């Protein structure tokens, strides 16, 4: 296959073929007559054929030139259609969300999100707090929400707000074990979704520690943890704002009647190595605005 080293020569050829004039082709291309002549000569040299012959009426295509002009015209139309298609394509922004953050905070505001970006396909993806552990996070999402303590080396992370934790269980579980003091947790089955660092932090704040043989159960995600807690399988730690509905309804109780500060929080994280698109940056700002509103609610709420 013959390789055309300068695609601009194809555009110049198409112009000369249409107008039959180097002068008019130069005007159309915003170029000079000498540049147009150079491109035609270069193309003829690359192909090894004569594409035009000079007549009293201007330039006419040779047989080879006419054959090439048909394919060039079709090719340029295809290129134009492709450019138009890409120009009309809606932007896509992918956001990785942990389940309870999505259901308790984002889901009620999806309408506002769509209205804020009518020309963007915002795709909300679920992950079980694993976004920062993925081998190729770029392939999964543009940015996301992660629970933890920050300091992920391959991510830019921005804490959304400071959290407070509550230890919660079902009313029946509290009554069965007679829970009234934080030290009573040593008699409980601890429910969690990843590791026991939150429990270790909580117990240290309470002046106690995990038993070496502390019963525990690791569950798949926060929703499963929540339902397991309500069903009396053990005691859980949750961000206080996440379980206000269950505490008010009485399906969960806070047996120690207080909340605790924590180093854990939700973070907005974006992987290093590839800058966010303009649209992704705008959607990111929307999530930061959502977080700012949530933070104000937390700050204005009475602490327990």
Image: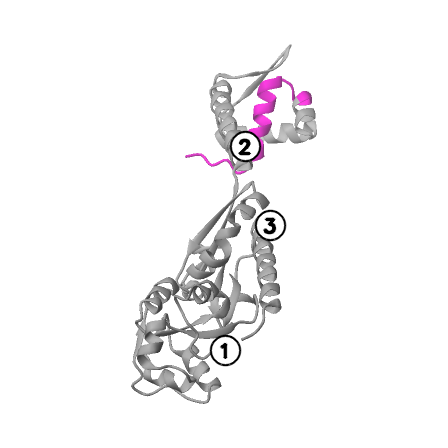
Mark pair 1, 3: CA separation: 43 Å
Look at discs 1 and 3 and give the one toward the viewer: 1
Look at discs 3 and 2 and give the one toward the viewer: 3
Q: Which mark is residue 258?
A: 1
Residue 191 percent location from the top left of the image:
35, 73
Q: Are marks 1 and 3 in contact (CB under 8 Å)?
A: no
Residue 153 visible in image? no
Identify the residue shown where x is 64% and y is 10%: 57
Report the residue that reaches farthest toward the bottom.
207
Q: Earlier in the sequence, mark 1 or mark 3?
A: 1
Q: Is residue 139 above or below residue 167?
A: above
Q: Secondary structure at mark 3?
A: helix
The local crowd at label 1, few if under 14, some if 14 to 19, many if 20 or more residues have their Cα within 10 Å, is few
| Residue extent of the magenta highlight | 1-24
Q: Nearer the viewer, residue 123 or 242?
A: 242
Dominant SS type (magenta): helix
The N terminus lies in which quarter of the figure? top left
Mark pair 1, 2: CA separation: 60 Å
The local crowd at label 2, few if under 14, some if 14 to 19, many if 20 or more residues have their Cα within 10 Å, is few
Q: Which mark is residue 153?
A: none
Residue 206 percent location from the top left of the image:
46, 86
The local crowd at label 3, few if under 14, some if 14 to 19, many if 20 or more residues have their Cα within 10 Å, is few
Q: Are marks 3 and 2 in contact (CB under 8 Å)?
A: no
Identify the residue shown where x is 56% and y is 40%: 119
Q: Which mark is residue 278?
A: 3
Q: Which residue is mark 2?
A: 84
Q: Is residue 29 above or below residue 234?
A: above
In the image, residue 303 lies in the stretch drawn in magenta:
no
Residue 40 percent location from the top left of the image:
58, 28
Q: Nearer the viewer, residue 300 or 119?
A: 300
Identify the residue shown where x is 53% and y is 71%: 163
């Amino acid at each position: 296959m013959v390789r055309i080293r300068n695609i601009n020569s194809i555009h110049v050829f198409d112009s000369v073929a249409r107008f039959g004039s180097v002068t008019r082709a130069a005007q159309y291309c915003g170029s000079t007559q000498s540049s147009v002549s150079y491109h035609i000569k270069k193309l003829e040299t690359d192909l090894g054929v004569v594409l035009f012959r000079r007549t009293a009426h201007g330039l006419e295509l040779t047989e080879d030139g006419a054959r090439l002009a048909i394919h060039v015209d079709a090719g340029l139309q295809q290129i134009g259609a492709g450019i138009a298609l890409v120009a009309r394509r809606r932007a896509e922004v992918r956001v990785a969300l942990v389940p309870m953050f999505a259901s308790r905070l984002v889901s009620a505001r999806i309408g506002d999100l769509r209205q804020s970006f009518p020309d963007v396909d915002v795709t909300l993806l679920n992950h079980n707090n694993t976004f920062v552990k993925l081998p190729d996070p770029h392939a999964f999402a543009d940015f996301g929400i992660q629970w933890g303590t920050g300091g992920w080396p391959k991510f830019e992370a921005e804490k959304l707000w400071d959290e407070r934790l509550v230890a919660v269980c079902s009313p029946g579980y509290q009554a069965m074990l007679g829970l009234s003091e934080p030290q009573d947790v040593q008699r409980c089955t601890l429910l969690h979704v990843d590791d026991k660092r939150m429990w270790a932090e909580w117990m240290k704040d309470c002046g106690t520690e995990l038993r070496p043989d502390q019963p525990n159960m690791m569950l798949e995600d926060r929703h499963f943890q929540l339902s397991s807690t309500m069903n009396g399988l053990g005691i859980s730690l949750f961000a206080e704002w996440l379980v206000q509905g269950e505490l008010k309804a009485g399906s969960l109780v806070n047996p120690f009647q207080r909340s605790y500060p924590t180093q854990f929080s939700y973070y907005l994280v974006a992987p290093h190595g590839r800058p966010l698109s303009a649209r992704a940056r705008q959607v990111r700002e929307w999530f930061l605005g959502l977080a700012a509103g949530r933070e104000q609610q937390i700050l204005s709420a009475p602490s327990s």
